[in-house]
Image (spheres, rainbow, N blue to C red):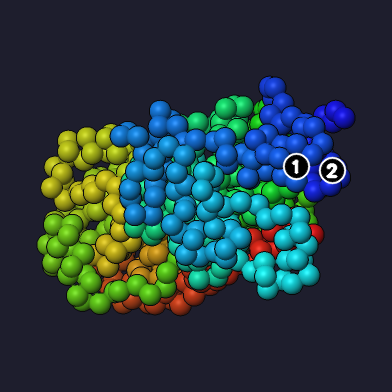
Amino acid sequence: MSIRWGRVLSVAGGAQRVCKDVPPFVSGAPLSRNRQPGRSRGGGPGAVGQGVCARQRRMPFRTRDVFPGGTSCIHPDGASVARRESPWAKASTARHPPERAPVAGVVGPGRVPSLAASMKNELHPAAAARPTRVAHVMYGLEMGGLEQLVVRLSEHGRSRGIDSVVLALGPDGPVRELLQRANIPTVWLGGLAGMTPTAIRRLAQEVDAFGADVVHGHDVGPWLNAVATRTLRPRTPVLGTFHQTVEPQGKLRPAAMAAAVFTQSLVACGSEVRASLERWSPKLLSRVVTIENGVPLTVSTGAEARRDARERLGLPQDATVVGYLGRLSEEKGPDLLVDAFLGHFAREPNTHLVMIGPGPMEASLRARAAASPLAGRVHFTGALLDASKLLPAFDVYVQPSRREGRSLSLLEAMAAGLPTVSHTVPAIREVHRDGQTALLVPTGDVVALADAVKRLTHDAELGARLGAAAKLESQRYSLANMVDAYAKLYRGAAAHAQA
């Protein structure tokens, strides 16, 4: 039997079931092959055709594809993982019932239960109770709001019955340490970004090894790769979250429209992002859902937190501090803030500017500041793992974004009760009301930006009022609400796939 873009699944007794719900848009040679009835690659009768058990027996971790020093994945305790050793073995044994425990000689967290066991679990749901396993696919491990959101979602999902693994396609970076601190198993795929057969096959192998119930892609590229894994795992549902407005162009547009058909839910982090999704996937409106980004609301903001944060940054305790937290990249507009400060704060000798975060513009911004007479009052920190703990050092927070989805740092500044100046980009107008929770100025107007910052540094009463209102508004964006919403979505997707 030959089925294009399908797969024969063999079950006990030689019965056959054909899965045709496989995305047809992946270019190149087909990544799945039909097997003979009753046989599987590396398995015997009764094994699922190319399922977890069969694939795990033949998939070693290859040290040439991995971290320097031969570590193929980030084990929760930071130890290197030897060839054919499961990176999730210890965690799986502690958290899952015996039928999901590691099996000698099998790479990955466990084996697929037999058909009889599956039928028993259907009749007795309690016997099948276990955490829902989610594989997060993201571009890389560099520091950014998206990456921090995935860390928090994975860490706090545990208390909601969600186990996670992070699969990173692109560059390595400091987020690796955040994941290790949170005991989140992570696999860095050594720069296998792009929809190549190698990248898709390797990604599917790691999804298999973890035994994922759901694959969750973050932003367009990782989401397309996540959907492409359905050529090898057609029954594993895929979710996609979009952290900024999405307008696929050229050849990417038909690929995205096709991928959306094979996606359980398309998640927008706000109304503006949702509107962009609906523009290019109008026939799939029922699959588009909105889950607002969330941040911890328990932020230390007292005098001690302020003093400690300023000591860490090397700032005078009596200084007036204007700050930014985020990536130093063009869409975030850090150059606009630096220009506003260098051009309009020469007569404010006690005012300092702090730029927290890494990014492609860091070197040029440092050079621009170094050439200014105000060089001693402009501070760059680079990447910091716990950057949000430094927010109490600020008197005024500035979010100078040219484009925005739903900025975590903006929400964190609100939770900290900081008076904020920002641009009137649509996504920020969804969060802030001008003159009530923040001061909003026209996008790109450096003079207006500087004037608004000065207004807050000179009017403590206005700053206190805006900060208090913003802190109250931040209750809408709690981390707990976000994690609860995603946990419900994961469980629903997994249950739908098993139905």
239 or 357, which lies in front? 239
Residue 463 lies in quadrant: bottom left
Disc 2: CA contacts within 10 A as few (<14), some (14-19) or many (>=20): some
Q: Position of residue 399 (x, y in %)?
A: 40, 55
- The reply to whether callout 1 and callout 2 are in contact (CB within 8 Å) is yes
Residue drawn at 84 percent across, 31 percent down:
3
Give how far across and how far down residue 111 sits, in percent. 61, 51
Q: Which mark is residue 8?
A: none
Q: Secondary structure at mark 1?
A: loop
Residue occupied by mark 1:
45
Q: Amino acid at mark 2?
A: Gly
Identify the image quadrant of the N terminus: top right
Amino acid identity at mark 1: Pro
Compared with 50, 127 (above or below) is below
Of residues 136 and 56, the one drawn nearer to the viewer in this rendering? 56
Quadrant assignment, res 375: top left
| Residue at the disc numbered 2 | 14
**Disc 1/disc 2 C-alpha distance (Å):** 7 Å
